[in-house]
Amino acid sequence: MRGLLSFYRGLYTLSNRQARRKAGIVGSRCGLCGTPSTSKPQPGFGLLFDIDGVLVRGRLPIPAAKKAFEKLVDSQGQFVVPVVFVTNAGNCLRQTKADQLSHILGVPITQDQVIMSHSPLRMFKKFHDKCVLVSGQGPVLEIAKNLGFKNVMSIDMLRESYPLLDMVDHNRRPKLPSNPIVTLSKVEAVILFGEPVRWETNLYLQQQPKHSDQINEPIPLSLSRFVSGLKITGKDLKYEALMGKPSELTYHFAEYLIRSQAMQRQWKLPVTSLYAIGDNLMTDIYGANLYNRYLEERAARKNPKAVAKMVAATGSTAAVPREEEMDSLWESELALPSATSCKSVLVCTGVYNPKAEVPSDANRCIKETVFHGHRDFRFDPALVEPGHIVQDVLEAVDLIFEQEKFVPQ
C-alpha cells in the first residue's frame, strides 16, 4: 500500500542520517537566537505524533520512540516542546489513552495532550445541550458526556425503549408486544464515534420515523474517523463535521492544544510551525498537508498583494472570503490559529514501505487502492507527498530540531 507515488524522491542515506544526528547534539548555543544562553531555549514549534506504527506496535514501544522521548523531556520529566498525540482511535476516553502512552513510553502524558477521533467535538458547544443520539463502540455515553454533551441517548437505550423497532436482530426481540419503557426526547443530532459492532441494527434504528418525524429541521450529523454515513427516513441529513485524520478540523484542534501547552509553560514565542509525524500517507501525511494548505490560503487572504491577484484573476471581490466567513467554517469557539505551516514527516516503521514496487499509473492506483476517506471527501494526489521521509521517529525528532535550530538543555 505504501511507496505507490513515483514522486517520492531522495530517500534518506546513512550519511545524512548521521549528519542530522550530529547537528541535533552539537553545540551549547540557544537554538532560537544562535548566541550562548544560560536560560532554557523556548520553542516556536509543536509536534503532532501519530501513535500506531510511529511510537508503538500493538502494546510494545518501537525502540526509536523511547530514545526520541528522552530528547523531548527534561530532567524533571517536562516536555521541552509542545507535544500532542493524534490518533483516529475513538473507542475510549482520552485519559485511558494517556495512561497507556505514559506506561509504554515511560514519560508523564496528560489527557490534554491526546486527541482521539472524537476530541474536536468539544468545539461544537452549540450541540452540547441538545439531545444527541450516539453510535459506535466502547463507552459511548461516557465519551459523549466527557466531551461536554449533557443529554445523550445511545442506540441501546433506543432499542430498549422500542424493542419492536429492531427488525434486524430477531433474537433480541421480545416474544410479546410491549409498551415503551420510557418516553425519550426527540433526537436533535446524531454522532457516529466509529463503526458499531451491530452496524445493521444501528443503521436501521437510526432510520425509524418514530424519532425522525418529531424533527422539522435537517438533522446534524457528526462523523468521527470518517465512518460510513447514514440517512434519516423522510428527513434531510446535514453534515456538521467529518472528524479524525485527515480532517482539517482535527489539526485545528491539535494546534489549539499546542498553543495551550505553550501558554501554560509561559513560553513567549508564538508557535508558528507544526510538524506532523506519521506512517500513513492517507491520514497522517494527507491531513498535515491539507491543514498546511489551509494555513497558507488563510495567510494569502490577509496579504493585500495576494488579494489583488485573486480579484484580478476572477474579476470580482466576491471570490475573496471575508474574515468572518473563513472563521465560521470551523464551527468552533477556538482562537484563530497562530501557526503558519504544518509540515509532514513520514516514518518507515509502520504502514509505509519504501521498498514497495511503484506502479506505472501511481495516481490512479492510489485513488483506487489506498484512499479510504469518506465518500464526500475530495481526494487530491498532491497532498500525499510528505515533506520529509525518515527511518523512524528518532530521526524525525533530530531532523525537526535541526530544521528549527533548537538545542534543548
Image (spheres, helix red, strand yellow):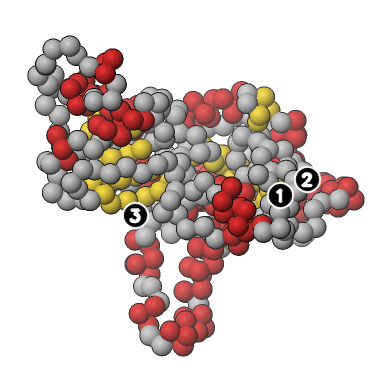
Q: CA distance from mark 3 to mark 1?
A: 36 Å
- Circles 1 and 2: CB atoms closer than 8 Å: yes
Q: CA distance from mark 1 to mark 2?
A: 7 Å
What kind of residue is marked 3? Glu
Q: Position of residue 57 (x, y in %)?
A: 66, 29
Q: Position of residue 87 (x, y in %)?
A: 53, 38
Residue density around tag 1, few if under 14, some if 14–19, many if 20 or more, within 10 Å: some
In the rendered image, the quadrant that contains the C terminus is top right
Q: Earlier in the sequence, mark 1 or mark 2?
A: 1
State the SS at label 1. Answer: loop
Residue assigned mark 1: 3
Q: Nearer the viewer, residue 290 or 169?
A: 169
- Circles 3 and 1: CB atoms closer than 8 Å: no
> On the picture, is 381 further left or further right than 320?
right
Q: Residue at x 72, y 60 (%)?
A: 7
- Circles 3 and 2: CB atoms closer than 8 Å: no
Is residue 288 visible to us here? no
**3 or 2: mark nearer the eye:** 2
In the rendered image, the quadrant that contains the N terminus is top right
Q: Residue at x 71, y 34 (%)?
A: 65
Is residue 165 visible to us here? yes
What kind of residue is marked 2? Lys
Q: Nearer the viewer, residue 405 or 295?
A: 295
Mark identifier at residue 355: 2
The answer to which quarter of the image holds residue 81 is top right
State the SS at label 3. Answer: loop
Residue assigned mark 3: 331
